[in-house]
């Protein structure tokens, strides 16, 4: 039996992405496709340091393999990459740079989420120290 390795860059990236540790999650992200002005909202199903599995229900998405994309990930910001495979309503993206998937999972805490005793309003008086 002749086992053949990946022959193209896309296949090589896809093979590396499949073998990487992935986090299964369900969150939304904004995806900007080259040649499209408005971002596409996608569901992130799997996320690893090198890529992600995205899912969309938009029928006019026209996501093609090899397309340059930029995905806005929570707590990370915009990450450039390219589409390495396309299936029915799903597609794989290989990032141009490594990310930390655990950072994306972290909950965003706003000041209003903090308990009142931990909030700083900026109007607190400076402490007064007295000499003894």
Image: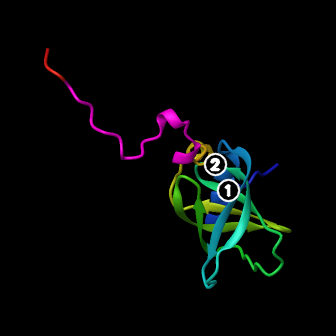
List the residue tagged with mark 2: 48
The residue at 36%/47% (across/down) is 122
Q: Is residue 126 above or below residue 100?
A: above
How many neighbours does mark 2 have within 10 angstroms: few (below 14), some (14-19), or many (20 or more)?
A: many
Numbered label attached to residue 94: none
Residue drawn at the location 84% of the way across and 78% of the way down: 59
Q: Quadrant of residue 120?
A: top left
Above or below residue 76? Residue 115 is: above
Q: Which quadrant of the structure image shows residue 83?
A: bottom right
Queried whether the magenta region covers residue 113, the answer comes back as: yes
* Helix, strand or loop at mark 1: strand
Q: Which residue is mark 1?
A: 52
Give the CA distance from mark 2 to mark 1. Answer: 6 Å
Please report contact status of discs 2 and 1: CB closer than 8 Å, yes or no.
yes
Magenta residues, start to end:
110-129
Which quarter of the image is occupied by the C terminus?
Answer: top left
Identified at 65% across, 75% down, the residue is: 39
């Amino acid at each position: 039996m002749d086992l053949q390795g990946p022959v193209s860059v896309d296949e090589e990236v896809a093979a590396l992405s499949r073998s990487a540790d992935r986090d299964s999650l369900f969150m939304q992200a904004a995806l900007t496709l080259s040649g499209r002005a408005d971002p596409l909202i996608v569901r992130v199903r799997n996320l690893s340091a090198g890529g992600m599995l995205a899912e969309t229900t938009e029928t006019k998405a026209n996501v093609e393999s090899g397309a340059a994309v930029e995905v806005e990930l929570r707590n990370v910001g915009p990450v450039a990459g390219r589409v390495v495979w396309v299936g029915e309503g799903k597609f794989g993206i290989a990032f141009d740079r490594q990310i930390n998937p655990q950072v994306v999972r972290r909950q965003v805490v706003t000041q209003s989420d903090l308990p009142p005793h931990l909030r700083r309003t900026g109007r607190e008086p400076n402490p007064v120290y007295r000499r003894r």
